[in-house]
Amino acid sequence: MAALKRLVDRLAAERGLPDADMLALLACGDGDVLSHLFARARAAREAVYGRDVYIRGLIEFTNFCKNDCLYCGIRRSNARACRYRLAEEEILLCAEAGYRMGFRTVVLQGGEDPYFTDERLCRIVRALKAARPDRAVTLSVGERSRESYQKLFDAGADRYLLRHETATKAHYGRLHPPELSFERRMRCLADLKAIGYQVGCGFMVGSPWQTLADIARDLAFIRRFEPEMVGIGPFIPHRDTPLGAFPSGTVDMTCKLLAIIRLLLPNALLPATTALATLDPRGCEKGMLAGANVVMPNLSPPDAREKYALYEGKASAAGETADALSDLKKRMENIGYRVTIARGDHRILPTGKQR
Ligand code: 5AD
């Protein structure tokens, strides 16, 4: 196992590993090696961001979606999904309630809902920025044209989350319907970056047919693309989807990957995701101890949260945000971390794109 520990040291020092070594690390389940990996990841995180935990207020504002991703509970073919969209005023009220609780980033996440035209979304972004100029606005509304991304950026959006889902074209094809394309996904990510957004990519851990070689390609892509944020969480099957009978991804693999990604990109903003917290009541703590530094509590109205079911058993489907936040603060303190209300931007912005 000493050899694998040395691989971890090499990963930390060189911010990468040759393919064969990365595969060996991905296949390793040894407790000592993993403790060493997590300790290195925490050290890398603390060197850049200290022990601060950044919070993002998530508003799931529509679960209408024109896409039919095979894994997703809000895919258009799921006739059992109970569809909703929040009114503009509701979105602004949720965000304002969040601001008062200390959320300096609001994440607008939704299905690809054609109702939210550029005009409507830009108006919401502008209203959010006008109301609270010190608040970052993150969008997570899927694939759009470059012109649309530009308009939203010009309206004031700061960040954009668009998971690449898998960096293996054939695997992408198995998880998505034929009308969605790997190339278009990658094009969207390149556009977002070129425009000047802080960009987040990411993938599901343990998605159907995913191999360690696929994961190694995801990691190589992440290293090359250098996103400001990386969102990863375990795949969790949803019974009303074609992939409903596949097993979930694991908490252990997710934490291992969080740690590896932290060492590949020490400056990245890495959330411990809701999916991780759904599989394990201590998922959030485990993610932090593996190098994550962001949590995204839900600001959506409770009835919306329940309906925004990408997968089954989603954590924090009920309860007041304020209670969830004070609970989170305590839990982070218990493991030696501190929730901060700072905006929590990426520490190195792409050159020439600062605002
Ligand atoms: N399990 C876990 N994550 C999922 N997502 C969608 N469906 C599932 C699922 N069944 C993730 C996708 C998407 C993000 C918003 O949620 O990676 O990009």
Image (spheres, rainbow, N blue to C red):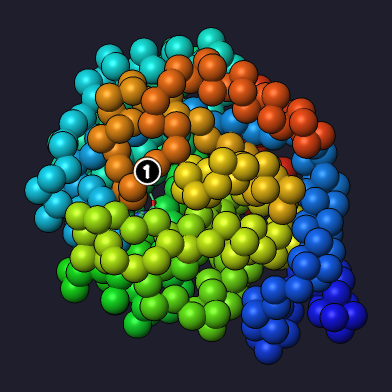
Residue at point 45% right, 17% down? Answer: 320
Quadrant in which residue 28 is drawn: bottom right
Residue at point 17% right, 43% down? Answer: 81
Residue at point 55% right, 47% down? Answer: 280
User: Which residue is more in the foreground, 225 or 308?
Assistant: 308
Quadrant in which residue 241 is drawn: bottom left
Residue 171 sits above or below residue 162 on the image: below
Quadrant location, ligand no. 1: bottom left
Q: Is residue 214 visible?
A: yes
Determine if the C-beta at disc 1 is less than 8 A from ligand 1. no
Q: Position of residue 147 (x, y in %)?
A: 30, 49
Q: State how many labels appear.
A: 1
Q: Residues within 10 Å of mark 1 (few under 14, many from 20)?
A: some
Q: Quadrant of the N terminus?
A: bottom right
Residue 206 sits above or below residue 124 on the image: below
User: Which residue is more in the foreground, 154 or 143?
Assistant: 143
Which residue does the numbered mark 1 point to in the structure image? Answer: 313
> Callout 1: helix, strand or loop?
loop
Residue 298 sits above or below residue 229 on the image: above
Q: Is residue 191 left or right of residue 296?
A: left
Q: Is residue 80 left or right of residue 208?
A: left
Q: Is residue 122 visible?
A: no
Q: Position of residue 238 (x, y in %)?
A: 29, 54
Residue 164 sits above or below residue 161 on the image: below
Q: Is residue 71 left or right of residue 207?
A: left
Residue at point 33% right, 23% down? Answer: 302
Q: Position of residue 31 (x, y in %)?
A: 78, 67
Q: Position of residue 232 (x, y in %)?
A: 52, 56
Q: Quadrant of the C terminus?
A: top right
